[in-house]
Image: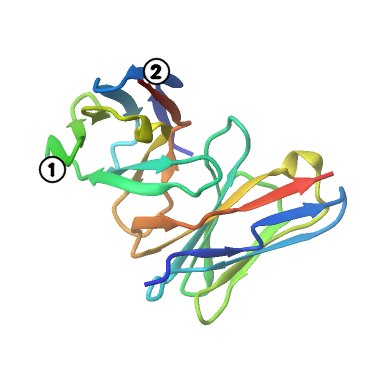
Amino acid sequence: EAGVTQSPTHLIKTRGQQATLRCSPISGHTSVYWYQQALGLGLQFLLWYDEGEERNRGNFPPRFSGRQFPNYSSELNVNALELEDSALYLCASSLRGLRAFFGQGTRLTVV
Amino acid sequence: QQQVKQSPQSLIVQKGGISIINCAYENTAFDYFPWYQQFPGKGPALLIAIRPDVSEKKEGRFTISFNKSAKQFSLHIMDSQPGDSATYFCAATPSGNTPLVFGKGTRLSVIA
């Protein structure tokens, strides 16, 4: 069974540009969670999607947004990139909340 | 957002020794407490998890101890090996479909 897959693995963008990160959950999982892991700051919750709806968002500005598609895959969009957005972005999926499994992450570098 | 406080920030243990990482929480609604292991350049991997109806759960060399009254839980790694060197995160969430709240992580180094 395939795990959570994220693409791209690495992404380099210029300040002010937009970034789009993608996540495919484990088959059968309906919830997708996005986390930001900046150096030394642990995992900060960004967004939670379940059954196609945004259920909750963390303490991040509106330029962080996303969506979940009918096949439960998800994308995270970050607009007007800032240098401090450079981080590892992790996607996790679960079925009914427990046993969340993470992907390998997308390393976003803003220059 | 409710916090989970994790300590120590870093830990050095001799091969064969016991590694102990502690976490404390405030939200009494938390009902599920997993631990994740993360190697450099990889996503966190679910290691072991516990519900508050038991005080201890063991899987191989990994044991979670849970103290509901103190609102604390800890991870014990017995017979620590160099391959256990990684960053460990505790987490918590209320039952149901809600996001995990993570501790800030402990970087474990097991030296020979």
Most distant residue in the front direction: B112
In front: mark 1 or mark 2? 2
**Hey, which residue is sitting farthest bottom in the picture?**
A70
Q: Quadrant of residue A95?
A: bottom left
**Residue under pointer 1:** B53
Vertical placement of residue A74 versus A37, above or below: below
For label 1, the crowd category at 10 Å Cα-Cα, with few meaning under 14, some 14 to 19 and many 20 or more, is few
Give the spatial CA distance, label 1 vs label 2.
32 Å
Q: Earlier in the sequence, mark 1 or mark 2?
A: 2
- Quadrant of the image containing the N terminus of chain A: bottom left
Circle 1: residue type:
Asp
Q: Where does residue A27 sit, x and y in percent of width and height?
A: 40, 75
Residue A93 location (% of width, % of height): 44, 62
Visible residue check, residue B32 = no
Kindly identify the residue that appears in the image at 52 percent across and 41 percent down: A43
Name the amino acid type tagged 2. Answer: Ile
Q: Position of residue B38 (x, y in %)?
A: 45, 41
The number of numbered badges drawn on the structure is: 2
Q: Quick one: SS at disc 1?
A: loop
**Residue B54: x %, y % from top left:** 12, 40
Q: Say which residue appears at 54% left-offset and 73% top-offset.
A: A73
Q: Nearer the viewer, residue A27 or A97?
A: A27
Left or right: A54 with respect to B106? right
Residue B8, by quadrant, is top left
The quadrant in which residue B68 appears is: top left
Q: Residue at x 45, y 20 (%)?
A: B10
Q: Which residue is mark 2?
A: B12
Label pair 1/2, CB-CB below 8 angstroms: no
